[in-house]
Image (cartoon, grey):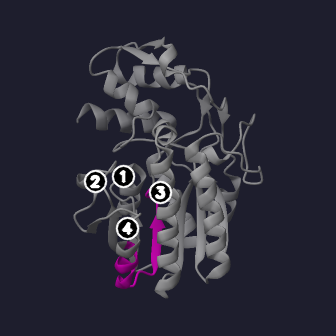
């Protein structure tokens, strides 16, 4: 990898991937429309293009720079927002992704491409989920990412690009740009130790964002097949009360969870737990950080904002 385009590089996971790419000496261009990402998250060494994925002509033009590698992370990620704005989610996540894939194929220079999928493509399953489980998304976000996987398969069939698909589980750490559980609790703690909450029983696989970024890099650098799909998660799951307990210990004060009806999701998986043996076996990846490490990183970031 020498010349890399990173979409969504001003975002949570993307900015950590940017750090790793620059650490490997890559010439990096970050493309982001800053609708959710933050300009200050983009490393100073990277070239920055503020652009929307839906701008097909602009996307095509930017690929004239001759990238050999693409990391496509840009998307609307927050499930409630996608459910409220399905038209925008589809335009960004599906049409925008098609623009990136078409530009990569027509460029004649791109050799490797990583694209982000999600655990939200899976149905509600008990126990660890491996990649052989049939997709069964339960929300708009998962539906758009399931479509992205089909688009990636078509790209792999129609080109010589090595395509990697990473199914992201729940990333945690600093620089989060969406109001997911952990950043939401940390923001609310600035005002009160009583936290209003919706669903409390679902268990999630929380992975440190730094481990997520290293998983992206492992696939990007190691994939020798036309297309490969791997879960990126830890295999450990925790419910909301357990996460709040970790944060409480780090924060040094008790947290009281107060369930409220208006925050409860009508459709919710009770379990999302990664079986990441494929990623570990094929690419030699293992998570380095514990859930407590992740919470400390997130707490340090948000208390210093």
Q: Disc 1 vs disc 2: Cβ atoms closer than 8 Å? A: yes
Give me the C-alpha separation between circle 3 and circle 1. Answer: 19 Å
Q: Residues within 10 Å of mark 2 (few under 14, many from 20)?
A: some
Decide which of tag 1 and tag 2 comes sooner along the chain. Answer: 1
23 w.r.t. 186: above or below: below
201 w.r.t. 298: above or below: above
- Residue at (24% x, 68% y) in the render: 45
Tag 4, which secondary structure?
loop
- Residue at (37% x, 39% y) in the render: 297
Decide which of tag 1 and tag 4 comes sooner along the chain. Answer: 1
Tag 2, which secondary structure?
helix
The residue wearing badge 2 is 41
Q: Which mark is residue 91?
A: 3
Q: Residue furthest front?
A: 87
Give me the C-alpha separation between circle 3 and circle 4. Answer: 10 Å
Number of marks present in the image shown: 4
Q: Which mark is residue 11?
A: 1
């Amino acid at each position: 990898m020498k010349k890399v385009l990173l979409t969504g590089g001003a975002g949570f996971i993307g900015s950590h991937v940017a750090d790793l790419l620059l650490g490997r000496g890559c010439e990096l261009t970050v493309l982001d429309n800053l609708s959710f990402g933050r300009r200050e998250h983009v490393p100073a060494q990277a070239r920055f293009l503020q652009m929307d994925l839906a701008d097909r002509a602009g996307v095509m033009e930017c690929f004239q720079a001759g990238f050999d590698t693409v990391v496509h992370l840009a998307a609307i990620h927050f499930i409630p927002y996608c459910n409220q704005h399905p038209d925008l989610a589809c335009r960004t996540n599906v049409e925008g992704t098609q623009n990136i894939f078409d530009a990569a194929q027509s460029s004649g220079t791109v050799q490797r491409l990583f694209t982000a999928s999600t655990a939200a493509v899976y149905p509600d399953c008990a126990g660890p989920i491996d990649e052989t489980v049939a997709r069964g998304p339960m929300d708009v976000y998962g539906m758009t990412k399931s479509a992205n996987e089909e688009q990636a398969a078509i790209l792999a069939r129609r080109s010589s690009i090595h395509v990697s698909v990473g199914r992201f589980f729940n990333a945690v750490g600093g620089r989060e740009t969406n109001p997911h559980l952990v950043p939401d609790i940390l923001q609310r703690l600035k005002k009160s130790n009583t936290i209003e909450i919706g669903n409390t029983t679902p268990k999630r696989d929380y992975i440190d964002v730094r481990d997520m970024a290293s998983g992206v890099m492992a696939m990007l650098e190691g994939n020798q097949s036309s297309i490969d799909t791997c879960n990126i998660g830890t295999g450990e799951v925790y419910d909301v009360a357990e996460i709040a307990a970790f944060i409480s210990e780090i924060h040094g004060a008790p947290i009281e969870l107060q369930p409220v009806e208006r925050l409860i999701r009508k459709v919710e998986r009770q379990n999302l737990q990664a079986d990441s043996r494929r990623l570990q076996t094929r690419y030699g990846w293992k998570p380095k950080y514990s859930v407590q490490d992740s919470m400390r990183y997130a707490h340090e970031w948000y208390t210093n904002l």
